[in-house]
């Protein structure tokens, strides 16, 4: 099954919906049905002491990649909202860029459960692992 949205549609949506994120060089780089990958370039505002990507940055990547993965299944439905995000930080995430790969674990009638793995771009080792739940809107309206 093919993705309900393209990379270009997702990146355009995120630029419009989250204009404050424009200063951070991030973009969706891969989509398929139920799966997405987002990358972000390193910036001093995103790093904690020691040069590691900060926890909030990694959580944001997990959330945004999951949001995009939801759209690959439902189309762009802005009112799908995060209802839970649980993250485990496994090791430092250090590099010139980081990425989050999200995939749908279960797509139910009222909620969608996803798994997100965050790592430095080019690394095989997962730096953090998140489970994310999105509530599906009662009356989905496409963007």
Image (cartoon, grey):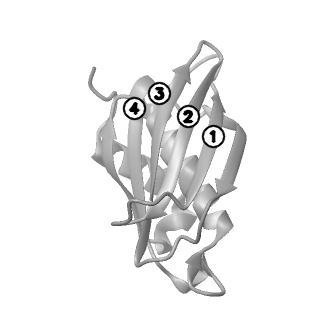
CA separation, marks 3 and 4?
13 Å
Of residue 95 and residue 70, the one placed in the foreground of this image is: 95
Please identify the residue farthest to the top as the structure is shown. 109
N-terminal label among 3 and 2: 2
Position in image of residue 37 (x %, y %): 39, 49
Residue 127 occupies quadrant: bottom right
Q: Whole-Å distance between the Cαs marked 4 and 2?
A: 12 Å
The answer to whether residue 76 of the structure is visible from this angle is no
For marks 1 and 3 on the same chain, the one whose residue lies earlier in the sequence = 1
Quarter of the figure that contains the N terminus = top left
Q: Secondary structure at mark 4?
A: helix
Instruction: Please determine whether, in this image, residue 4 is positioned above or below residue 130.
Output: above
Residue at numbered disc 4:
72
* Secondary structure category for the residue under label 3: loop
Could you tell me residue 84's position as x and y percent? 73, 38
The answer to whether residue 129 of the structure is visible from this angle is yes
């Amino acid at each position: 099954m093919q993705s309900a949205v393209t990379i270009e549609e997702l990146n355009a949506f995120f630029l419009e919906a989250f204009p404050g994120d424009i200063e951070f060089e991030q973009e969706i780089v891969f989509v398929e049905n139920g799966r997405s990958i987002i990358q972000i370039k390193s910036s001093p505002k995103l790093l904690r002491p020691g040069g590691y990507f900060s926890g909030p940055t990694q959580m944001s990547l997990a959330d945004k990649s999951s949001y995009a993965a939801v759209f690959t299944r439902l189309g762009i439905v802005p009112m799908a909202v995060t209802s839970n995000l649980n993250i485990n930080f496994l090791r430092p995430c250090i590099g010139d860029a980081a990425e989050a790969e999200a995939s749908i674990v279960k797509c139910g009638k009222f909620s969608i459960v996803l798994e997100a793995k965050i790592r430095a771009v080019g690394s095989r080792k997962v730096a953090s692992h998140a489970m994310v739940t999105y509530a599906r809107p009662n009356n989905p309206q496409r963007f």
